[in-house]
Image (cartoon, rainbow, N blue to C red):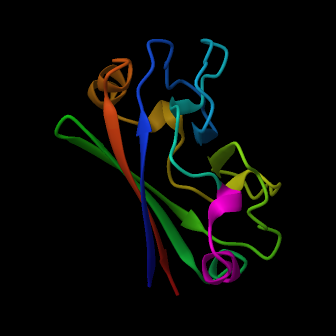
Protein backbone atom coordinates (compact mmCIF):
# COMPACT_ATOMS: atom_id res chain seq x y z
CA UNK A 1 0.00 0.00 0.00
CA UNK A 2 1.17 3.50 -0.85
CA UNK A 3 -0.27 6.79 0.40
CA UNK A 4 0.11 10.36 -0.78
CA UNK A 5 -1.22 13.17 1.39
CA UNK A 6 -1.76 16.70 0.16
CA UNK A 7 -4.00 19.73 0.51
CA UNK A 8 -6.37 21.54 -1.82
CA UNK A 9 -8.56 24.54 -1.13
CA UNK A 10 -12.13 25.70 -1.54
CA UNK A 11 -13.44 28.26 -4.02
CA UNK A 12 -16.72 30.18 -4.24
CA UNK A 13 -17.43 28.79 -7.75
CA UNK A 14 -17.33 25.09 -6.80
CA UNK A 15 -20.65 23.54 -7.85
CA UNK A 16 -19.89 19.78 -7.79
CA UNK A 17 -22.49 18.83 -10.40
CA UNK A 18 -20.56 16.84 -13.02
CA UNK A 19 -22.05 13.38 -13.47
CA UNK A 20 -19.00 11.38 -14.60
CA UNK A 21 -15.87 12.96 -13.10
CA UNK A 22 -14.42 14.63 -10.03
CA UNK A 23 -11.31 16.80 -10.30
CA UNK A 24 -8.73 18.54 -8.12
CA UNK A 25 -6.53 21.18 -9.75
CA UNK A 26 -3.40 23.16 -8.95
CA UNK A 27 -4.94 26.19 -10.64
CA UNK A 28 -6.16 29.12 -8.53
CA UNK A 29 -9.03 30.31 -10.71
CA UNK A 30 -12.30 28.52 -11.34
CA UNK A 31 -15.50 29.38 -13.18
CA UNK A 32 -18.82 27.65 -12.60
CA UNK A 33 -18.29 25.88 -15.94
CA UNK A 34 -15.76 23.62 -14.15
CA UNK A 35 -18.56 21.56 -12.61
CA UNK A 36 -16.31 18.58 -11.83
CA UNK A 37 -13.70 20.58 -9.89
CA UNK A 38 -14.01 20.24 -6.10
CA UNK A 39 -10.70 21.78 -5.02
CA UNK A 40 -8.20 24.35 -6.30
CA UNK A 41 -4.57 25.22 -5.48
CA UNK A 42 -3.74 21.55 -4.84
CA UNK A 43 -0.25 20.98 -3.42
CA UNK A 44 0.51 18.31 -6.03
CA UNK A 45 -0.41 17.21 -9.53
CA UNK A 46 -0.14 13.75 -11.07
CA UNK A 47 3.24 14.53 -12.64
CA UNK A 48 4.66 15.12 -9.13
CA UNK A 49 4.01 11.56 -7.99
CA UNK A 50 6.89 9.11 -7.74
CA UNK A 51 7.73 6.20 -10.01
CA UNK A 52 6.43 3.53 -7.60
CA UNK A 53 3.02 5.24 -7.41
CA UNK A 54 2.93 5.53 -11.20
CA UNK A 55 3.81 1.83 -11.51
CA UNK A 56 0.95 0.88 -9.17
CA UNK A 57 -1.50 3.14 -11.03
CA UNK A 58 -0.70 1.38 -14.31
CA UNK A 59 -2.08 -1.94 -12.98
CA UNK A 60 -5.77 -2.78 -13.44
CA UNK A 61 -5.64 -4.73 -10.18
CA UNK A 62 -4.69 -1.67 -8.10
CA UNK A 63 -7.51 -0.12 -6.07
CA UNK A 64 -7.13 3.66 -5.90
CA UNK A 65 -9.03 5.75 -3.37
CA UNK A 66 -9.16 9.53 -3.08
CA UNK A 67 -10.10 10.58 0.45
CA UNK A 68 -11.12 14.20 1.07
CA UNK A 69 -12.05 15.89 4.37
CA UNK A 70 -13.18 19.45 5.03
CA UNK A 71 -14.63 20.95 8.20
CA UNK A 72 -15.63 17.59 9.69
CA UNK A 73 -17.16 16.23 6.45
CA UNK A 74 -15.48 13.43 4.49
CA UNK A 75 -15.91 11.80 1.11
CA UNK A 76 -14.14 8.93 -0.63
CA UNK A 77 -13.98 8.18 -4.34
CA UNK A 78 -12.70 4.70 -5.24
CA UNK A 79 -11.73 3.25 -8.59
CA UNK A 80 -8.94 1.30 -10.21
CA UNK A 81 -5.70 1.76 -12.01
CA UNK A 82 -5.26 0.93 -15.69
CA UNK A 83 -2.35 0.21 -18.06
CA UNK A 84 -2.93 3.52 -19.87
CA UNK A 85 -2.56 5.71 -16.78
CA UNK A 86 0.72 7.59 -17.01
CA UNK A 87 0.21 10.47 -14.54
CA UNK A 88 1.72 13.10 -16.83
CA UNK A 89 -0.42 16.16 -16.12
CA UNK A 90 1.10 19.03 -14.17
CA UNK A 91 -2.20 20.76 -13.39
CA UNK A 92 -4.99 18.39 -12.45
CA UNK A 93 -6.13 14.93 -11.43
CA UNK A 94 -9.44 13.53 -12.59
CA UNK A 95 -11.28 10.50 -11.21
CA UNK A 96 -13.51 9.06 -13.93
CA UNK A 97 -16.54 6.79 -13.70
CA UNK A 98 -15.71 5.63 -17.22
CA UNK A 99 -12.64 3.77 -18.47
CA UNK A 100 -11.35 6.82 -20.41
CA UNK A 101 -7.63 7.41 -19.92
CA UNK A 102 -5.49 10.48 -20.53
CA UNK A 103 -2.60 12.25 -18.82
CA UNK A 104 -5.02 13.86 -16.33
CA UNK A 105 -6.71 10.61 -15.21
CA UNK A 106 -5.95 9.54 -11.63
CA UNK A 107 -8.34 6.53 -11.67
CA UNK A 108 -10.91 4.85 -13.89
CA UNK A 109 -14.16 3.06 -13.01
CA UNK A 110 -14.69 5.42 -10.06
CA UNK A 111 -17.70 4.82 -7.86
CA UNK A 112 -18.52 8.55 -7.57
CA UNK A 113 -18.46 11.74 -9.59
CA UNK A 114 -18.79 15.30 -8.31
CA UNK A 115 -22.60 15.09 -8.47
CA UNK A 116 -22.55 12.06 -6.13
CA UNK A 117 -20.78 13.90 -3.31
CA UNK A 118 -22.81 14.99 -0.29
CA UNK A 119 -24.32 18.44 -0.81
CA UNK A 120 -23.20 19.41 2.72
CA UNK A 121 -19.63 18.45 1.76
CA UNK A 122 -19.84 20.49 -1.47
CA UNK A 123 -21.31 23.45 0.42
CA UNK A 124 -18.18 23.52 2.63
CA UNK A 125 -15.97 23.47 -0.48
CA UNK A 126 -17.47 26.78 -1.62
CA UNK A 127 -15.72 28.63 1.19
CA UNK A 128 -12.51 30.22 -0.15
CA UNK A 129 -10.84 29.66 3.24
CA UNK A 130 -11.72 25.94 3.31
CA UNK A 131 -8.73 23.60 3.57
CA UNK A 132 -9.34 20.17 2.04
CA UNK A 133 -7.18 17.38 3.49
CA UNK A 134 -6.65 14.88 0.68
CA UNK A 135 -5.10 11.45 0.52
CA UNK A 136 -4.58 9.09 -2.39
CA UNK A 137 -4.31 5.43 -1.36
CA UNK A 138 -3.01 2.74 -3.72
CA UNK A 139 -3.67 -0.91 -2.73
CA UNK A 140 -2.55 -3.91 -4.77
Magenta part of the chain: 46-55
Residue 10 sits above or below residue 100 on the image = above
Horizontal placement of 100 versus 20: left or right? right
Query: Most extreme residue toward the left, as rendered?
Result: 72
- Main SS of residues in magenta: helix
Residue 117 vertical placement versus 7 (above, below): above
How far across and down, in percent of the image, does residue 32 sit?
60, 12
* Residue at (83% x, 70% y) in the render: 84
Which quarter of the figure has residue 129? top left
Q: Residue at x 63, y 74 (%)?
A: 50
Q: Nearer the viewer, residue 46 or 113?
A: 46
Provide residue 107's location: percent of width, then percent of height: 63, 61
Residue 101 visible (yes or no) = yes
Q: Tell me, yes or no, if residue 108 can be seen here.
A: no
Q: Is residue 114 magenta-colored?
A: no
In the figure, residue 22 lies in which quadrant?
top right
Number of marks present in the image shown = 0
Image coordinates of residue 67 in percent, x first then y, are 38, 55
Residue in the image at 62% along x and 67% along y: 49
Residue 72 in percent (x, y) is at: 16, 39
* Placement of 138 over or under 17, stated as above or below: below
Relative horizontal placement of residue 3, taking residue 86 as reference (left or right): left
Left or right of residue 113: residue 70: left
Amino acid sequence: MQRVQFKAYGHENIVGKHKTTVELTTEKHLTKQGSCIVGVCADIALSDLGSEIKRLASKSSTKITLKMSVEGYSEEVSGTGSPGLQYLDSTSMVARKSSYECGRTVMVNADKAASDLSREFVKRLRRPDAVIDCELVFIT
